[in-house]
Protein backbone atom coordinates (compact mmCIF):
# COMPACT_ATOMS: atom_id res chain seq x y z
CA UNK A 1 0.00 0.00 0.00
CA UNK A 2 1.08 3.56 -0.73
CA UNK A 3 -0.52 7.01 -0.62
CA UNK A 4 -2.53 6.26 -3.76
CA UNK A 5 -3.33 2.59 -3.18
CA UNK A 6 -5.41 0.87 -0.51
CA UNK A 7 -5.78 -2.88 -0.18
CA UNK A 8 -8.98 -4.24 1.41
CA UNK A 9 -9.68 -7.99 1.53
CA UNK A 10 -6.98 -8.61 -1.11
CA UNK A 11 -8.53 -6.07 -3.46
CA UNK A 12 -6.62 -2.93 -4.41
CA UNK A 13 -8.23 0.47 -4.77
CA UNK A 14 -6.39 3.31 -6.53
CA UNK A 15 -7.24 6.79 -5.21
CA UNK A 16 -6.14 10.39 -5.49
CA UNK A 17 -6.61 11.17 -1.80
CA UNK A 18 -6.87 9.23 1.44
CA UNK A 19 -8.67 10.37 4.59
CA UNK A 20 -7.64 8.25 7.58
CA UNK A 21 -10.45 8.06 10.15
CA UNK A 22 -9.64 4.79 11.92
CA UNK A 23 -10.44 6.08 15.41
CA UNK A 24 -9.19 4.89 18.76
CA UNK A 25 -9.40 2.02 21.22
CA UNK A 26 -9.62 1.94 25.04
CA UNK A 27 -6.32 1.83 26.91
CA UNK A 28 -5.60 -1.20 29.09
CA UNK A 29 -3.43 -1.12 32.19
CA UNK A 30 -0.34 -3.40 32.01
CA UNK A 31 -0.59 -4.37 35.67
CA UNK A 32 -0.32 -7.76 37.42
CA UNK A 33 -3.53 -9.78 37.32
CA UNK A 34 -5.36 -7.47 34.92
CA UNK A 35 -5.07 -9.72 31.88
CA UNK A 36 -6.57 -12.61 33.81
CA UNK A 37 -9.29 -10.31 35.15
CA UNK A 38 -10.20 -9.43 31.57
CA UNK A 39 -10.29 -13.10 30.57
CA UNK A 40 -12.57 -13.80 33.54
CA UNK A 41 -14.93 -11.06 32.39
CA UNK A 42 -14.60 -9.00 35.56
CA UNK A 43 -12.39 -6.23 34.18
CA UNK A 44 -14.11 -4.56 31.24
CA UNK A 45 -13.60 -1.40 29.21
CA UNK A 46 -16.02 1.24 27.91
CA UNK A 47 -16.96 -1.04 25.00
CA UNK A 48 -17.47 -4.17 27.08
CA UNK A 49 -19.64 -2.46 29.68
CA UNK A 50 -22.27 -1.87 26.99
CA UNK A 51 -22.80 -5.64 26.74
CA UNK A 52 -23.08 -6.74 30.37
CA UNK A 53 -26.22 -8.88 30.91
CA UNK A 54 -27.66 -7.04 33.92
CA UNK A 55 -27.19 -4.05 36.18
CA UNK A 56 -24.41 -4.90 38.65
CA UNK A 57 -24.79 -4.50 42.39
CA UNK A 58 -21.33 -2.96 42.59
CA UNK A 59 -18.94 -1.33 40.13
CA UNK A 60 -15.35 -0.18 40.56
CA UNK A 61 -14.33 2.50 38.06
CA UNK A 62 -10.61 2.99 37.47
CA UNK A 63 -10.21 6.52 36.14
CA UNK A 64 -12.03 9.75 36.96
CA UNK A 65 -12.15 11.16 33.45
CA UNK A 66 -15.21 11.84 31.32
CA UNK A 67 -16.05 8.25 30.32
CA UNK A 68 -15.52 6.87 33.81
CA UNK A 69 -17.69 9.55 35.42
CA UNK A 70 -20.43 9.17 32.81
CA UNK A 71 -20.69 5.42 33.34
CA UNK A 72 -20.31 5.82 37.09
CA UNK A 73 -23.28 8.20 37.25
CA UNK A 74 -25.34 6.03 34.90
CA UNK A 75 -24.99 2.91 37.00
CA UNK A 76 -25.27 4.77 40.31
CA UNK A 77 -28.63 6.13 39.13
CA UNK A 78 -29.69 2.53 38.47
CA UNK A 79 -28.88 1.51 42.04
CA UNK A 80 -25.31 0.24 41.64
CA UNK A 81 -22.81 0.95 44.40
CA UNK A 82 -20.06 2.79 42.53
CA UNK A 83 -16.50 3.52 43.62
CA UNK A 84 -14.22 5.69 41.47
CA UNK A 85 -10.45 5.28 41.83
CA UNK A 86 -8.71 8.37 40.47
CA UNK A 87 -4.92 8.64 40.32
CA UNK A 88 -4.96 12.45 40.28
CA UNK A 89 -5.95 14.79 43.14
CA UNK A 90 -9.29 15.53 41.47
CA UNK A 91 -11.74 14.05 39.00
CA UNK A 92 -12.31 15.63 35.58
CA UNK A 93 -9.03 17.53 35.88
CA UNK A 94 -9.45 19.19 32.46
CA UNK A 95 -12.49 21.19 33.60
CA UNK A 96 -12.81 24.56 35.27
CA UNK A 97 -12.37 24.28 39.03
CA UNK A 98 -15.87 25.61 39.75
CA UNK A 99 -17.26 22.80 37.59
CA UNK A 100 -15.07 20.19 39.25
CA UNK A 101 -16.20 21.28 42.69
CA UNK A 102 -19.90 21.11 41.84
CA UNK A 103 -19.72 17.79 39.99
CA UNK A 104 -17.70 16.24 42.81
CA UNK A 105 -20.33 17.39 45.30
CA UNK A 106 -23.13 15.95 43.15
CA UNK A 107 -21.33 12.61 42.82
CA UNK A 108 -21.03 12.25 46.56
CA UNK A 109 -24.42 13.62 47.65
CA UNK A 110 -26.86 12.91 44.81
CA UNK A 111 -25.33 9.73 43.40
CA UNK A 112 -23.68 8.43 46.59
CA UNK A 113 -20.55 7.60 44.59
CA UNK A 114 -17.40 6.92 46.60
CA UNK A 115 -14.62 8.99 44.98
CA UNK A 116 -11.09 8.03 45.99
CA UNK A 117 -8.46 10.46 44.70
CA UNK A 118 -4.65 10.04 44.67
CA UNK A 119 -5.28 6.32 44.27
CA UNK A 120 -2.42 4.41 42.66
CA UNK A 121 -3.72 1.09 41.32
CA UNK A 122 -1.17 -1.70 41.72
CA UNK A 123 -2.74 -5.03 40.72
CA UNK A 124 -5.84 -7.18 40.45
CA UNK A 125 -5.62 -9.99 42.97
CA UNK A 126 -8.18 -12.50 44.30
CA UNK A 127 -10.99 -10.68 42.52
CA UNK A 128 -10.10 -7.30 43.99
CA UNK A 129 -8.40 -4.13 42.81
CA UNK A 130 -5.38 -3.39 44.99
CA UNK A 131 -4.43 0.27 45.26
CA UNK A 132 -2.43 2.65 47.44
CA UNK A 133 -3.33 6.04 48.90
CA UNK A 134 -0.68 7.98 50.84
CA UNK A 135 1.42 4.83 51.21
CA UNK A 136 -1.39 2.72 52.66
CA UNK A 137 -2.59 -0.34 50.73
CA UNK A 138 -6.28 -0.96 50.15
CA UNK A 139 -8.35 -3.39 48.12
CA UNK A 140 -11.89 -3.30 46.76
CA UNK A 141 -14.11 -5.78 44.93
CA UNK A 142 -16.91 -5.18 42.47
CA UNK A 143 -19.16 -7.25 40.27
CA UNK A 144 -17.32 -5.50 37.46
CA UNK A 145 -14.24 -3.30 37.22
CA UNK A 146 -14.45 -0.62 34.54
CA UNK A 147 -11.03 0.20 33.13
CA UNK A 148 -11.44 3.81 32.01
CA UNK A 149 -7.93 5.15 31.58
CA UNK A 150 -8.06 6.98 28.29
CA UNK A 151 -7.92 5.90 24.66
CA UNK A 152 -5.16 5.20 22.16
CA UNK A 153 -5.12 5.89 18.45
CA UNK A 154 -5.27 3.03 15.98
CA UNK A 155 -4.18 3.13 12.34
CA UNK A 156 -3.13 -0.43 11.55
CA UNK A 157 -2.13 -0.84 7.92
CA UNK A 158 -1.01 2.75 7.44
CA UNK A 159 2.37 2.45 9.20
CA UNK A 160 4.31 2.07 5.95
CA UNK A 161 3.25 5.49 4.69
CA UNK A 162 5.81 7.23 6.88
CA UNK A 163 3.27 9.38 8.69
CA UNK A 164 4.58 11.89 11.21
CA UNK A 165 3.22 11.20 14.71
CA UNK A 166 2.64 13.42 17.73
CA UNK A 167 4.04 12.61 21.20
CA UNK A 168 0.61 11.08 21.99
CA UNK A 169 1.00 8.74 18.99
CA UNK A 170 -1.65 10.57 17.01
CA UNK A 171 -1.20 11.37 13.33
CA UNK A 172 0.23 14.88 13.07
CA UNK A 173 -1.94 17.30 11.07
CA UNK A 174 -2.11 20.96 10.11
CA UNK A 175 -5.16 23.24 10.22
CA UNK A 176 -6.53 21.59 7.06
CA UNK A 177 -6.09 18.08 8.51
CA UNK A 178 -3.30 17.42 6.01
CA UNK A 179 -0.57 15.02 7.16
CA UNK A 180 3.10 15.21 6.21
CA UNK A 181 2.28 13.00 3.21
CA UNK A 182 0.79 14.84 0.24
CA UNK A 183 -2.88 13.92 -0.44
CA UNK A 184 -3.17 11.98 2.85
CA UNK A 185 -5.47 13.44 5.51
CA UNK A 186 -6.38 12.36 9.06
CA UNK A 187 -9.53 13.21 11.03
CA UNK A 188 -11.16 12.24 14.31
CA UNK A 189 -9.69 10.25 17.19
CA UNK A 190 -6.72 9.04 15.13
CA UNK A 191 -5.17 12.51 15.40
CA UNK A 192 -5.13 12.24 19.20
CA UNK A 193 -6.73 15.66 19.53
CA UNK A 194 -10.36 16.27 20.55
CA UNK A 195 -11.73 12.71 20.65
CA UNK A 196 -15.32 13.78 20.07
CA UNK A 197 -17.81 12.82 17.37
CA UNK A 198 -18.77 16.41 16.53
CA UNK A 199 -15.10 17.36 16.23
CA UNK A 200 -14.58 14.51 13.75
CA UNK A 201 -17.59 15.63 11.69
CA UNK A 202 -16.16 19.16 11.37
CA UNK A 203 -12.74 17.69 10.57
CA UNK A 204 -14.28 15.67 7.75
CA UNK A 205 -15.83 18.83 6.30
CA UNK A 206 -12.50 20.65 6.55
CA UNK A 207 -10.59 17.83 4.84
CA UNK A 208 -13.20 17.38 2.10
CA UNK A 209 -13.18 21.09 1.31
CA UNK A 210 -9.40 21.14 1.24
CA UNK A 211 -9.34 18.28 -1.27
CA UNK A 212 -11.99 20.01 -3.40
CA UNK A 213 -10.18 23.36 -3.18
CA UNK A 214 -6.90 21.86 -4.36
CA UNK A 215 -8.77 20.22 -7.22
CA UNK A 216 -10.25 23.62 -8.17
CA UNK A 217 -13.80 22.42 -7.56
CA UNK A 218 -16.54 25.05 -7.72
CA UNK A 219 -17.92 26.24 -4.36
CA UNK A 220 -15.14 24.58 -2.35
CA UNK A 221 -14.42 26.64 0.77
CA UNK A 222 -11.10 27.34 2.45
CA UNK A 223 -12.14 26.09 5.92
CA UNK A 224 -9.68 25.54 8.75
CA UNK A 225 -9.94 23.64 12.04
CA UNK A 226 -9.48 25.46 15.36
CA UNK A 227 -9.59 22.99 18.24
CA UNK A 228 -9.90 25.86 20.73
CA UNK A 229 -13.43 26.33 19.39
CA UNK A 230 -14.54 22.72 19.86
CA UNK A 231 -17.09 22.35 22.70
CA UNK A 232 -16.91 19.41 25.10
CA UNK A 233 -19.90 17.83 26.82
CA UNK A 234 -20.37 15.40 29.70
CA UNK A 235 -23.63 13.50 29.80
CA UNK A 236 -24.49 13.20 33.45
CA UNK A 237 -27.19 14.87 35.53
CA UNK A 238 -26.59 17.78 35.75
CA UNK A 239 -25.04 18.02 32.30
CA UNK A 240 -21.67 19.70 31.78
CA UNK A 241 -20.51 21.68 28.75
CA UNK A 242 -17.50 23.86 28.08
CA UNK A 243 -15.48 25.57 25.38
CA UNK A 244 -12.18 27.43 25.46
CA UNK A 245 -9.95 28.02 28.46
CA UNK A 246 -10.54 27.33 32.13
CA UNK A 247 -9.91 29.96 34.77
CA UNK A 248 -6.97 28.02 36.18
CA UNK A 249 -5.37 27.81 32.71
CA UNK A 250 -5.62 31.56 32.28
CA UNK A 251 -4.13 32.14 35.72
CA UNK A 252 -1.26 29.79 34.93
CA UNK A 253 -0.61 31.56 31.63
CA UNK A 254 -0.87 34.96 33.36
CA UNK A 255 -3.61 36.12 30.98
CA UNK A 256 -5.70 39.10 32.05
CA UNK A 257 -9.40 38.24 32.24
CA UNK A 258 -12.68 38.87 33.99
CA UNK A 259 -15.43 36.36 34.70
CA UNK A 260 -18.97 36.09 36.00
CA UNK A 261 -21.01 33.12 37.18
CA UNK A 262 -24.82 33.08 37.25
CA UNK A 263 -26.76 30.34 39.11
CA UNK A 264 -29.72 28.53 37.57
CA UNK A 265 -31.45 28.90 40.95
CA UNK A 266 -32.25 32.48 39.84
CA UNK A 267 -33.83 31.37 36.55
CA UNK A 268 -37.62 30.94 36.40
CA UNK A 269 -37.55 28.03 33.95
CA UNK A 270 -35.12 26.16 36.18
CA UNK A 271 -37.39 26.71 39.16
CA UNK A 272 -40.42 25.52 37.20
CA UNK A 273 -38.56 22.41 36.02
CA UNK A 274 -37.10 21.75 39.50
CA UNK A 275 -33.63 21.84 37.88
CA UNK A 276 -31.89 24.61 39.79
CA UNK A 277 -28.51 22.90 40.24
CA UNK A 278 -25.67 24.51 38.34
CA UNK A 279 -24.57 27.74 36.71
CA UNK A 280 -23.30 29.49 33.60
CA UNK A 281 -19.78 30.90 33.79
CA UNK A 282 -18.14 32.93 31.03
CA UNK A 283 -14.60 34.30 30.94
CA UNK A 284 -13.70 37.27 28.71
CA UNK A 285 -10.72 39.38 27.77
CA UNK A 286 -11.33 42.74 29.55
CA UNK A 287 -10.35 45.21 26.82
CA UNK A 288 -11.95 43.80 23.67
CA UNK A 289 -14.46 41.52 25.45
CA UNK A 290 -13.65 38.45 23.35
CA UNK A 291 -14.77 35.19 24.94
CA UNK A 292 -11.88 33.17 26.34
CA UNK A 293 -13.89 30.34 27.86
CA UNK A 294 -17.38 29.25 28.88
CA UNK A 295 -18.44 26.61 31.39
CA UNK A 296 -21.98 25.41 32.08
CA UNK A 297 -23.33 22.90 34.59
CA UNK A 298 -27.03 22.20 34.63
CA UNK A 299 -30.10 20.97 32.82
CA UNK A 300 -29.64 21.42 29.02
CA UNK A 301 -26.04 22.62 29.44
CA UNK A 302 -25.03 20.65 26.35
CA UNK A 303 -27.60 22.59 24.31
CA UNK A 304 -26.86 26.00 25.81
CA UNK A 305 -23.14 25.92 24.95
CA UNK A 306 -23.90 26.17 21.21
CA UNK A 307 -24.89 29.86 21.40
CA UNK A 308 -21.55 30.75 22.94
CA UNK A 309 -19.60 28.59 20.48
CA UNK A 310 -21.37 30.32 17.57
CA UNK A 311 -20.28 33.74 18.86
CA UNK A 312 -16.70 32.56 19.30
CA UNK A 313 -16.67 31.01 15.81
CA UNK A 314 -17.94 34.25 14.26
CA UNK A 315 -15.31 36.20 16.25
CA UNK A 316 -17.98 38.09 18.14
CA UNK A 317 -17.72 39.37 21.70
CA UNK A 318 -19.72 39.20 24.90
CA UNK A 319 -21.46 42.37 23.70
CA UNK A 320 -23.33 40.43 21.00
CA UNK A 321 -24.67 37.99 23.58
CA UNK A 322 -25.62 40.80 25.98
CA UNK A 323 -27.54 42.54 23.19
CA UNK A 324 -29.35 39.34 22.22
CA UNK A 325 -32.88 38.97 23.57
CA UNK A 326 -33.11 35.64 25.39
CA UNK A 327 -36.73 34.41 25.59
CA UNK A 328 -38.45 34.06 28.94
CA UNK A 329 -38.85 31.62 30.54
CA UNK A 330 -35.89 29.60 29.25
CA UNK A 331 -32.65 28.24 30.62
CA UNK A 332 -30.83 30.39 28.05
CA UNK A 333 -31.62 33.47 30.13
CA UNK A 334 -28.68 32.50 32.35
CA UNK A 335 -26.34 32.99 29.38
CA UNK A 336 -27.82 36.43 28.79
CA UNK A 337 -27.50 37.33 32.47
CA UNK A 338 -23.79 36.47 32.51
CA UNK A 339 -23.24 38.45 29.33
CA UNK A 340 -25.09 41.46 30.77
CA UNK A 341 -22.97 41.35 33.91
CA UNK A 342 -19.73 41.19 31.93
CA UNK A 343 -20.91 43.96 29.59
CA UNK A 344 -22.35 46.42 32.12
CA UNK A 345 -21.01 45.25 35.46
CA UNK A 346 -24.28 43.86 36.83
CA UNK A 347 -26.69 41.05 36.03
CA UNK A 348 -30.36 41.98 35.77
CA UNK A 349 -31.96 39.41 38.07
CA UNK A 350 -29.21 38.51 40.53
Image (tube, rainbow, N blue to C red):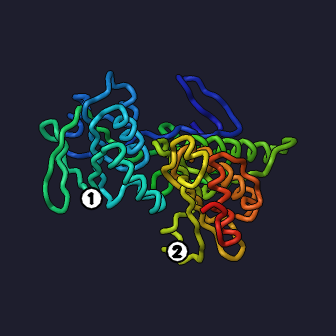
Judge the density around disc 2: few (<14), some (14-19), many (≥20) Cα neighbours within 10 Å: few
The reply to whether residue 164 is visible in this rendering is no
The residue positioned 39% from the left and 45% from the top of the image is: 69
Image quadrant containing the C terminus:
bottom right
Image quadrant containing the N terminus:
top right
Task: Give x and y (percent) for residue 298.
Answer: 52, 48
Contact (Cβ within 8 Å) of mark 1 with mark 2: no
Task: Give x and y (percent) for residue 269.
Answer: 60, 45
Q: Which residue is mark 1?
A: 118
Disc 1 and disc 2: Cα gap in Å?
25 Å
In the picture as drawn, the residue positioned furthest to the right comes out as 218
Q: Which residue is mark 2?
A: 253
Helix, strand or loop at disc 2? loop
Helix, strand or loop at disc 1? loop
The residue positioned 70% from the left and 69% from the top of the image is: 343
The residue positioned 32% from the left and 49% from the top of the image is: 108
Task: Give x and y (percent) for residue 83.
Answer: 27, 44
> Upstream in the sequence, badge 1 or badge 2?
1
Amino acid sequence: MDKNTISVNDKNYHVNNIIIATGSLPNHLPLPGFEQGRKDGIIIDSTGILSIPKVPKSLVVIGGGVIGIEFGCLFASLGTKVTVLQALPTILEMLDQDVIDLVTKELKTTYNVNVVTNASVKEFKNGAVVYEVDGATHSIKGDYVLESVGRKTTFDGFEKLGLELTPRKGIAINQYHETNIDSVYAIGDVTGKAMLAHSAVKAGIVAANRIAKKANKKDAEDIIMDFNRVPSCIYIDPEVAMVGKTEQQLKQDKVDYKTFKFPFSAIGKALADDSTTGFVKIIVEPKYKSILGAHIVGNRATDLIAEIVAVIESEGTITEIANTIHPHPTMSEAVGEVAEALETGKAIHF
